[in-house]
Image: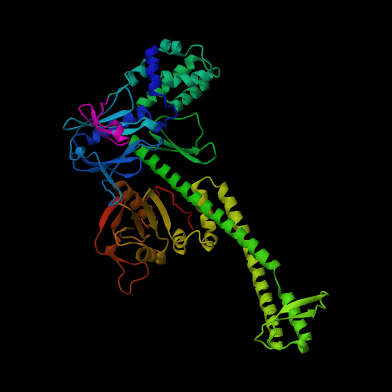
Amino acid sequence: MFEQGAQITKNTSERKTAMIRNYFALYDLVREMSERFTDGYIFECFSQEKGELRISLFTESKKGFTIVGKTGETRLALYYTEEVARRRRNTATLMRETNERQIKHIRISDFDRIIYFELEGDLQLVFQLFSANTNFLLIKKGIILEAFKKNEEHAGKAFAETATVPIVQTLERYVQQETLFEEAFAGLSEKELQKKLPQVLIGFDATLAREAMFRAKEKSPNMTLRALHEAVSEIFYELISPEPKVYKGKSDKGEAAYWFSIIQERHRAFESVDQFESVNEAMKFYSFKLHQLEHFGKELKTFRSQLERLIEKTTAQLHALEAQAEKNRAEEYEQCGQLLMANLHRLEKGMNEITVENFFGGGSMVIPLDSKKTPYQNAEMYFEKARKSRASAEMSKQRLESAKENLTIQQRLLAELLEIKEQKAFERWRKMNLSVIQKFLLVSKEEAEKQTLFRRFQLAPNVELWVGKNAKNNELLTFKYARPNDLWLHARGVSGSHCILKSSKPPTKDELERAASIAAYYSAAKGSELAPVICTPKKYVRKPKGAEVGAVIVEREEVLLVKPELCIEASEDES
């Protein structure tokens, strides 16, 4: 029992690992990949993002996919997508020996979160998914040829698993033998139970331990070991028959949060849940939602920083204008002019200064003169300075009031931003204040226009669908904002919105079908069971001479048959 416990501690030392890396989730993902990719071929391995490995491959039927592995992000691990595109720049080719190698077998270790792609030529591509210690390795006959992380440290060394206790069989034994379970946890407090559960039950992480404790309390408020055993048993059978989900809820700070699970979670509150047919689809969706949150967080942080700098600049301008207002010398110049007029009889051309009795303030004062000017011209010079000073003071006063107003608006915007926790709230805030933030140059005129002109749907991190709102708007979208190689979509044979699919790389089949479903939804075919949708690069769309606004001719087309539906919310509120 002691040896077993020692090994389990090794397996679950990182108890905060997200369920995205749970052994049972990976077990089911491997089953999916094995069914799809066995006997296929790896095309190439490369990296185009820090901490991310991409493996392009083709199935036996020549269909392309990319497996995406993450090392630097504890919330993400592994998923695959229907694409083989690679950026032309800023990418690095890795593990070249895998190129054009056939995939003989895909399996997961019985003892740990280690996935093996067995390739021809005695090669193994290994995914070691240990949270902070995640790494991807190329191995030949037990020797590491190349490591994704810390290659110099690992290359040339032997690779061997250190865990020796089978996960599924061990957990199954505790589930089937209640006596064994009670012996392992007898006499422990609730706090000790929650800590020890993931240490003894291989495959259980901290999240599953909390869920087991919650369910046990539902069964028995006194937390009996029998109730805990029943809860663990329920969870075990859910783990081996996974129902992948992505939950949306709140973080401890009240911000939007998503989490992936393959069981029915009851121990924490959530706002909504999306269910999926496969673990991979759930993982892809989860990855996309995290990307959205990260993008939202960066955008929000950028706006806050810009506003904070703007407030500092406006405050400094305000202080300068206040100081300038205090230095208004119009009255002093006026008095100098009047004193010179009263002493014209004493003035002569060529004098640099004159001392006069100051009948405004008492005593005497020295007035500088322009030696090249006549006495009368010197007096006029001071009257002109007085006029200019008054005009400047009036302008400064207006600028001062404007600066005060701007500072109040900027402080209000920042206060509102500091309260925003979710992307939808941020989108509403930005739309509501678009003219103001454009005035302060926080967004360009073009970006402000784009934000309000079209409906926008984020289908993937780098894939967005823009949808026209009316005939004039459709024409603007197609012939001003669409690039030649953007994909143009429109419901075939009926009136509807022009749609432009913008993507930094060729969209996947799933992304294209979702875009087509949205295009059909915004057409007269909305109520149909299925609707044909034209899809073609925008360069094949032209406006016939003399045609009505929004009317086009399509010179080349592909037709997709889809269900009209709004499968994702618009990035901006509808107007």
Q: Nearer the viewer, residue 263 or 13?
A: 13
Answer whether residue 158 is magenta in the image. yes
Can you tell which quarter of the image residue 252 is in?
top right
Q: Can residue 203 be seen in this view?
A: no
Tally of marks: 0
Percent across and percent down for residue 43 are: 21, 42
Which residue is at a point 50% across and 24% down the rendered structure image? 214
Which residue is at a point 42% across and 42% down the rendered structure image? 290
Q: Which of 433 and 177 is in front in this view?
A: 433
Does 77 sit left or right of 385 as displayed?
Answer: left
Q: In this view, does 34 lie above or below 536?
A: above
Q: Is residue 306 above or below residue 288?
A: below
Does 329 sit left or right of 150 as displayed?
Answer: right
Percent across and percent down for residue 392 are: 65, 73
Percent across and percent down for residue 337 are: 74, 82
Does 508 sit left or right of 469 as displayed?
Answer: left
Give the image's coloring scheme.
rainbow
Q: Is residue 228 above or below residue 284?
A: above
As drawn, which residue projects farthest toward the left?
Answer: 121
Q: Which of 468 and 399 is in front in this view?
A: 399
Can you tell which quarter of the image residue 241 is in?
top left
Q: Can residue 10 be seen in this view?
A: yes
Which contiguous range is marked in magenta?
137-159
Which residue is at a point 34% across and 55% down the rendered structure image? 501
Q: In which quarter of the image is the N terminus?
A: top left
Does 297 sit left or right of 556 as displayed?
Answer: right
Percent across and percent down for residue 329 are: 71, 73
Answer whether residue 285 is magenta in the image. no
